[in-house]
Amino acid sequence: MSKKTKQKNLAKKRAVSGYLFILPFILGFLFFMVKPFFQSLYMSFCTVDISAQGVKYIFAGLDNYKRAFLIDPEFNQMLTDEVWRMVINSISTIIFSIFVALMLNTQFKGRAFVRAVFFLPVIFSSGIIVGLDANNALLSSMAKSAEASTGSSVTAVLEQILTSANVGSKFMDTIFDIVNRVYDIASASGIQIIIFLSALQTIPQSMYEAADIEGCTKWESLWKITMPMISSMFLVNWIYTIVDFFTKTDNQIMNKIKTQMTTYMAYDFSSALAWIYFAVVMVMVGVSALIISKVVYYYE
Amino acid sequence: MSKTANSNTLTFKERNRLSGGYLLRKKTLGVIINICFFLLMFGLCFLILQPILNKISLSLMTESDLYDSTINLLPRHFTISNFGLAAQLMEYRVAFRNSLLVSGGVSLVQLIACTLVGYGFARFDFPLKKFWFFCVILVIVIPPQTISSALYLHFYYYDFMGLFKAIKGSTINLRGSMLPYFLMSAGCMGLKDGLYIFLIRQYFRGVPKELEEAAYVDGCGTLSTFIRIMLPDAKPILVSCFLFSFVWQWTDSFYTNLFMGRVKVLSRELGSLADSLSYYVQRISGGSSQASVGYMQQINAVGVLMVVTPIILLYLVAQRGFVESLSQTGIKM
């Protein structure tokens, strides 16, 4: 009996110290996340009046949302554009990063160098630099002239042939669009490559050996061993990619929210915009996470 | 029998004949695959490096080179004056020092808070643990932009539980000072803090329980076990989290714009570099001429290079630790 109470005491003590350890998070979460979170939700239903004395909230119902969807000339278009761009970008980022991670996981000369290069975008495509580079016509014209100096570009010729054949032109356009933006995709997949790489390195080599002895080809073991073993990373990477895209500085909607907030001081309207966008993205993340988690395989 | 025993002394031709042409086919296929692999790798590396190389060549040109259509990549009038001008316009020395202070300080605070929290989640059992960890995931997923307007007002009219209003009669404006940002970092709500908690927790989960138990048996308390046993082993993951947050903080414009209105840091200066250039050109020409778009974009490229160089150097020094320690964590979800 006394042993049991002792154990209980120990467990209680552990629980208390556990709470002490995560205390910074709890405090920060309550003060800097929950409070502003509900405040901005409330603000989106209000008219915010700012004066020297402080802030006044006047309840306005759905006015801000109506303004976003019905009155604002560009928001609907922006929203569909950005969501579509997000879907295309995220899918291609995931495929690209798996591909690169698989290649980087093989042994070859100069691997350390290539790895270092592939990690550079984490620095170069962060924060303010993305927005600056996206608007820099001088650099893009340089890239074009570099392309032109190699004679006729292979992709351009290929594009011409395929579009003139007129087969599924809408689909082809999307593909070409992705090919043309391969730099953006490469620069957005730094972290994803690392996450996939680390997953690849945890697969025990003995699995491949066993498969090899049983007569599996490399191609078969890619689909039967590698893919299931790293499938749990798909979910992580998918969510990370979407969120990363969400917060990029070259995102049109985010820019609109920012200008509404800082130049027009329309805190109510910008909150409403942010909430609409957030809700749309959350629905997307939720649905896709459900679908992906159905096919994820957990190896214990 | 003698043939198989001597197979390593046979010429390639004979061995190929013995295998019925299989050896040659296999060898050729291997070479072709290697060549394709090399081309692909070269192309992908070039793809990533090209914009950087472009920026370097652009930064070494004079303004007149920009409009010369015969010049593509190599400058004709070689100059490094662009760097001097950019440094002057960005107030590089002051901004660099401030950036170093802000990034270093914030990353350190973030790291300390996230390590504590990550360790708590990894090694202790307490009620509602699942719920709180769900909140961590929520922090990763909720973009700061959603709550930015509320945060902005929160710190603009800052009032800690009505205390300031009671004493001074009005709320205080904390925007423009660095304090709110440090507070947020200490509360694990800074830039990408959820991710760091996740990574650190993942690392500590992998540490064998026996290590901890042995420390307890030897009379270590909870805190001293953490500091003396667990932390020294966790150095690689802590270093890489610190570097991550340092690098991201260095180029971040969202939080710096939101909170540090008056502090000159590199990312802010870089954002307004083109404007300061046009202002500068107007001033030295007496308002008669303006900076051309090309010139502004050139100075932007120079600015990006100058901002990025320190962190690239840092990255090259720490590169090994960066990738390797991450693969040690064996991130799972």
Image (cartoon, coloured by chain):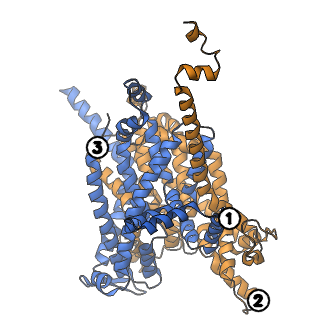
Chain colours: A blue, B orange
Residue type at mark 2 is Ser
Residue name at image x 42 percent, y 39 percent: B204
What is the C-alpha distance between the residues marked 2 and 1? 38 Å
Q: Is residue B13 visible?
A: yes
Disc 2 secondary structure class: loop
Would you say A199 lies left or right of A109 here?
left
Chain for numbered disc 2: B
Per the image, the residue denoted by label 2 is: B285
Residue type at mark 1 is Ser
Residue name at image x 30 percent, y 68 percent: A280
Per the image, the residue denoted by label 3 is: B126
Q: Position of residue A39 (x, y in %)?
A: 32, 72
Disc 1 secondary structure class: loop
Which residue occupies the extreme top position in the image? B1
Q: Around disc 1, counting alpha carbons within 10 Å, would you say few (fewer than 14), some (14 to 19), or many (20 or more)?
A: few
Chain for numbered disc 1: A
Which mark is drawn over residue A149?
A: 1
Q: Nearer the viewer, residue B292 or B259?
A: B292
Disc 2 to disc 3: CB gap under 8 Å: no
Which mark is drawn over residue B319?
A: none
What is the C-alpha distance between the residues marked 1 and 3? 64 Å
Residue A207 image-quadrant placement:
top left
Residue name at image x 54 percent, y 50 percent: B242
Residue type at mark 3 is Phe
What is the C-alpha distance between the residues marked 2 and 3? 68 Å
Q: Position of residue B71 (x, y in %)?
A: 75, 71
